[in-house]
Amino acid sequence: MAFKNYYYVDESLKGAAVASALGLASLTGGTETADAKPAITFTSPSRIPVKVSPSPTYDPSFIKEVKEAENSVNAGWRNNKFYPYPSVEGGTATIGYGHKLTNSESRTGKFSSGLTKSEATALLLKDLRDSEDRLKRHLRLKYGVDYNTLKLNQKEILLDFTFNIGNVTTKFPKFTQHVLNKNKAGMIKEYERKYKDKKGRVYPLQDRNERTLRFIQDQF
């Protein structure tokens, strides 16, 4: 079972030009369109025609889970916008739903004026799509696996890891193999993630680990 084919358009994205400015080709939200064409065009509230490509088709519950896992406490939220806040692991700041600023974004103050929730959602969708592209490449190069042949639960858990920690095939090779083989017991042995703080101390990603365990137990 692959991802369903539909356009995922967030009703809260009141200015579609915002997503375009962020470099996002597909918006996110909640309407399903049958017989999807390569792209559709609609008029934003500002009357600017915007072409929207088909999304990688993420389930709304998956997007909700990623948002909560990345920023359930609304860090950086003030005056109805998200602003950059210090990353627990050090380095550049983070904004919205887990977007760690690049050196260029940090240096130029790209997000210094903040992001609305709609804009943060658009940025998350772009980041997820970029992560998905990397995951497809990593699986193909290391295992000769076509990502598109995976079940939905396999895609979502591997994408969550890739978005969160980078190349899951090298950082969690045993876990990746267990996911590909649908080995639930093996996954439960290997799923736990950790992080280093600014002083190099190692801590478990407790909330993330709890969410991952629930997903494994419920979906595999």
Image: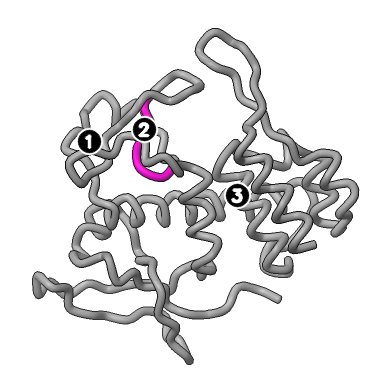
| Label 1 residue SS | loop
Magenta extent: 93-97
Residue under label 1: 110
Q: Nearer the viewer, mark 3 or mark 2?
A: 3
Quarter that holds the C terminus: bottom right
Q: Quadrant of residue 45?
A: bottom left
Relative horizontal placement of residue 25, taking residue 198 as reference (left or right): left
Mark 1 closeness class: few <14, some 14–19, many ≥20 residues within 10 Å: few
* Quadrant of the rendered image containing residue 51: bottom left
SS category of the residue bearing label 3: helix
What is the three-letter code of the residue carrying label 3? Asp
How crowded pointer 2 is (Cα within 10 Å; few <14, some 14-19, many 20+) is rated as some
Q: Is residue 218 left or right of residue 120?
A: right
Residues at marks 2 and 1 touching, judged by CB atoms closer than 8 Å: yes
| Spatial CA span between label 2 and label 1 | 9 Å
Report the Cα–Cα distance between label 1 and label 3.
Answer: 25 Å
Seen at 45% across and 69% down, the residue is 55
Determine which residue is flagged by label 3: 160
Q: Residue at x 50, y 13 (%)?
A: 198
Q: Earlier in the sequence, mark 2 or mark 1?
A: 2
Comparing labels 1 and 3, the label whose residue is closer to the camera: 3
Q: Earlier in the sequence, mark 1 or mark 3?
A: 1
